[in-house]
Image (cartoon, rainbow, N blue to C red):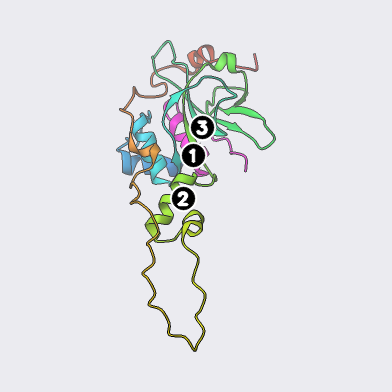
């Protein structure tokens, strides 16, 4: 299902708008959680650090990967929260959502209300910096599924294939042999944390613009409608 664009309400809540997009929640709902769980001030500013972004995704049950540098647009995952170039006036960054549709359309959903075109693919102007993969409606990785099976005591197909075949039933007129104890299915205790959450990056500088005027934003950010 395509991601629905959410427009930020002020100059500092682009991160909250991106969380609203990938969770399918309203911006107000995400803000309420941010105030309660992350200590955001009610009246702002609502800048988003990496730590708070991860907390919000965890709260809404959204799986994600490690933060990493953007190499090429083609190498990006189907869905990601991306950090764009820093604004010269503030030194802070801006967050957008990258989406690759089933039809192969690649674009960024930019929550910036000052833009005339918020669904963007002008990559040379956006100047992407880093991204966090978002695993939305994707099947669990095989390794994770195997660990989950082991923790629940369910044998995987590989375990069942490796188990010895059951012995044939002995005829009634023969003395039944003592059955040998079957080997327990091999398995190890899974880790409690996923790869994405095992190593939480140190909080980065506050994301988004706090003090820039809307007119300055329009000048500093590329506007495809020019």
Number of marks in picture: 3
Occupied quadrant, residue 120: top right
Q: Is residue 103 left or right of residue 109?
A: right
Occupied quadrant, residue 6: top right
Q: Looking at the picture, how far across and down is residue 215, in whole percent?
A: 51, 15
Q: Which residue is mark 2?
A: 145
Determine whether label 2 and label 3 are within 8 Å by CB: no
The segment highlighted magenta reads: 1-25
Q: Is residue 84 magenta?
A: no
Q: Looking at the picture, how far across and down is residue 119, in whole percent?
A: 62, 27
Please rate how many residues cluster around mark 3, counting C-alpha atoms within 10 Å: few if below 14, some from 14 to 19, many from 20: many
> Which dot, 2 or 3, sits closer to the camera?
2
Q: Residue at x 34, y 44 (%)?
A: 193
Q: Is residue 123 left or right of residue 217?
A: right
In the rendered structure, which disc, 2 or 1, sits on the residue that comes first in sequence?
Answer: 1
Please rate how many residues cluster around mark 1, counting C-alpha atoms within 10 Å: few if below 14, some from 14 to 19, many from 20: many
In the rendered structure, which disc, 2 or 3, sits on the residue that comes first in sequence?
Answer: 3
Secondary structure found at label 1: helix
Q: Quadrant of the C terminus?
A: top right
Q: Quadrant of the N terminus?
A: top right
* Magenta segment main secondary structure: loop
Q: Is residue 157 above or below residue 60?
A: below
Q: Which residue is mark 1?
A: 20
Q: CA distance from mark 2 to mark 1?
A: 28 Å
Q: Looking at the picture, how far across and down is residue 143, in whole percent?
A: 45, 45
Q: Which residue is mark 3?
A: 80
Q: Residue at x 57, y 14 (%)?
A: 125
Secondary structure found at label 3: strand
Q: Is residue 221 left or right of residue 190?
A: right
């Amino acid at each position: 299902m395509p991601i629905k664009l959410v427009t930020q309400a002020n100059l500092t809540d682009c991160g909250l708008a991106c969380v609203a997009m990938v969770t399918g929640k309203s911006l107000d709902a995400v803000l309420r959680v941010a105030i309660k769980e992350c200590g955001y001030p009610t009246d702002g500013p609502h800048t988003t650090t990496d730590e708070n972004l991860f907390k919000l995704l965890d709260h809404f049950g959204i799986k994600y990967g490690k933060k990493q540098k953007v190499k090429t647009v083609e190498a990006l995952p189907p869905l990601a929260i991306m950090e764009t170039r820093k604004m010269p006036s503030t030194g802070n960054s801006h967050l957008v959502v990258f989406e690759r549709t089933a039809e192969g359309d690649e674009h960024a959903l930019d929550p910036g209300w000052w833009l005339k075109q918020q669904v963007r693919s002008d990559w040379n102007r956006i100047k992407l910096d880093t991204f966090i993969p978002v695993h939305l409606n994707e099947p669990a990785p095989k390794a994770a599924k195997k660990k989950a099976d082991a923790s629940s005591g369910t044998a995987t197909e590989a375990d069942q294939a490796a188990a010895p075949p059951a012995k044939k039933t002995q005829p009634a007129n023969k003395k039944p042999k003592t059955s040998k104890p079957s080997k327990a299915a091999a398995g190890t205790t899974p880790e409690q944390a996923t790869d994405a959450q095992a190593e939480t990056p140190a909080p980065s500088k506050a994301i988004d613009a706090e003090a820039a005027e809307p007119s300055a934003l329009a000048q500093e950010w590329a506007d495809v409608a020019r």
